[in-house]
Image (cartoon, rainbow, N blue to C red):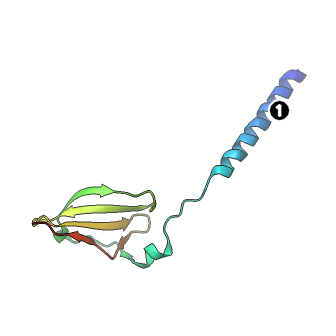
Amino acid sequence: MKGGSMKRKMLFLFIIILLLLVSLQCKKIDSGSEEQFSSAIALNEIPAEYGKLIAVTTVDQYPHWAQLWFEDEQNTIRMVRVQWTQKLMHQEVLTIPRD
């Protein structure tokens, strides 16, 4: 029985060391800098004149933010950045006019 007990203790110790090593490799994900939030407003609604939603994209550097791409009847494209966890919208809207 001593051999089995020793194996269990070694396995337990191995698991504890493995968990410690894994936890040391973790890093906190920044949910957004103060600069991002200072230029954001409450997300109440996105104007209908922006047109139809044609795409949604994300960027790894800005977790919890998404870019909503719209196209109106004049083929003008607009990109609106939204932060869904805080329900914010960036004040600057990228507008790309097309002929």
Quadrant (top left, top right, bottom left, bottom right) of the C terminus? bottom left
- Indicate the quadrant where residue 71 lies: bottom left
| SS assignment at label 1 | helix
Relative vertical location of residue 76 with respect to residue 27 in this rendering, above or below? below
Residue 13 spot, x, y in % from top left: 79, 37
Q: Residue furthest bottom?
A: 38
Type of the residue with mark 1: Lys
Residue name at image x 48 percent, y 68 percent = 32
Residue closer to the observer: 19 or 61: 61
Q: Is residue 29 left or right of residue 85?
A: right
Q: Residue furthest front?
A: 99
Identify the residue position indicated by label 1 in the image: 9
Residue name at image x 76 percent, y 36 percent = 14
Q: How many marks?
A: 1
Residue 1 spot, x, y in % from top left: 88, 20
Q: Is residue 14 left or right of residue 43?
A: right
Q: Is residue 42 left or right of residue 73?
A: right
Residue name at image x 31 percent, y 75 percent = 92
Residue name at image x 49 percent, y 75 percent = 34
Mark 1, Cα crowd under 10 Å, few <14 / some 14-19 / many 20+, is few
Relative vertical location of residue 77 with respect to residue 23 in this rendering, above or below? below
Residue 2 spot, x, y in % from top left: 90, 23
Q: Is residue 35 left or right of residue 23?
A: left
Residue 42 spot, x, y in % from top left: 37, 75
